[in-house]
Image (cartoon, grey):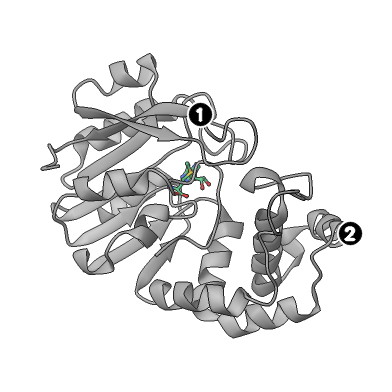
Amino acid sequence: MNSFLAYMGGKSLLANKIIPKIPEHKCYVEVFAGAAWLMFKKDETISDVEIINDINSDLVTLYRIVKHHLEEFIRYFKWILVSRDEFQRFRKEDPETLTDIQRAVRFYYLLKLGYAARINSHSFSIATTSKPRLNLLRIEEELSAVHLRLSRVYIENRAYADVFTRFDKPDTFFYVDPPYYGCEDYYGTGIFARTDFVKLRDILAGISGRFILSINDVEYIRELFAGFHIETVKTSYSASGANRKKQVNELLIMNHEPLQ
Ligand SMILES: C[S@@+](CC[C@H](N)C(=O)[O-])C[C@H]1O[C@@H](n2cnc3c(N)ncnc32)[C@H](O)[C@@H]1O
């Protein structure tokens, strides 16, 4: 199935190239989950346990609400309009002053209707070529399957280093999809810095589980991770705008050699 979110840096197009390279494991962990495209697209039965983690509390609240309080979430949308005014009203709200359900509704609304699936988008997006990404009449239909899928998934809200410490075991598989090199502050300030690539490399060199790291193809990263197995795959940007059709190389870095 597909993720329910379009997300900046989401791996909707790349997931099918990564999934065949996932080694056998018992516990599946997405360390930088975002919209968790890989988790949604893979076969759930290949993992006994599934964990998704992200440092963004608004995003994690949305996952938890869709998992545990879908009815209340949907009921909220009865009184909401798809409009620029509503978008601006949501933008001005401080998430800290909201209940968890309100916070999840706000984040979902802004992500669905903001420009290019960015978190913290300032502009309400109207495309002349497609319908609004949020169809208030179909929310229930769209989210029911997600609600069921999440019923067996643990949802964590931690910084990445803590996730490795907690869940590393020989039969754990980590999918590691950090911000791109050169876009470290794309998901907020102070959560991921250029120096984190070195920290991440050192953590990955010491784990007993298996991992796949996906990242943009730059020389710095190739050199930093030179001790691991590295494959190059082609992908294209899926965000709206001028880059839509642009083909780029992405690196898949692993501590195993995949069969495919
Ligand atoms: C490239 S996106 C992941 C996209 C995801 N694979 C998908 O398919 O949608 C990177 C994610 O890492 C999260 N992140 C950034 N810094 C983090 C940190 N220090 N610890 C955990 N998550 C972090 C961001 O909030 C963002 O959602």
Instruction: Please give left or right for residue 38 compared with residue 54 in the image.
Output: left
For mark 1, does the 10 Å Cα neighbourhood hold few (<14), some (14 to 19), or many (20 or more) residues? Answer: few
- In the rendered image, residue 103, in percent from the top left (x then y), is placed at 68, 66
For marks 2 and 1, give the CA distance: 33 Å
Could you say which disc has been placed on residue 151 in the image? Answer: none
Disc 2 crowd, CA 10 A, few/some/many (<14, 14-19, 20+): few
Name the element at disc 2: helix
Q: Quadrant of the C terminus?
A: top left
Is residue 118 visible in the rendered structure shown here? no
Write the residue at 54% across / 39% down. 191
Circle 1 SS class: loop
Asked if residue 251 lies left or right of residue 108, the reply is left
Q: Which residue is mark 2?
A: 85
Q: Callout 1, which amino acid?
A: Lys
Marking on residue 246: 1
- Residue 108 vs 165, above or below: the answer is below
Residue 228 drawn at (x, y percent): 19, 28
Q: Is mark 1 within 8 Å of ligand 1?
A: no
Which residue appears at 35% of the width and 59% of the height? 41
Instruction: For ligand 1, tell me if the residue under mark 2 lies within 8 Å.
Output: no
Q: Picture coordinates of residue 237 (x, y %)? A: 50, 36
Is residue 58 in view? yes
Toward the viewer: 56 or 48?
A: 48
In the rendered view, tell whether residue 148 sits above or below residue 1. below
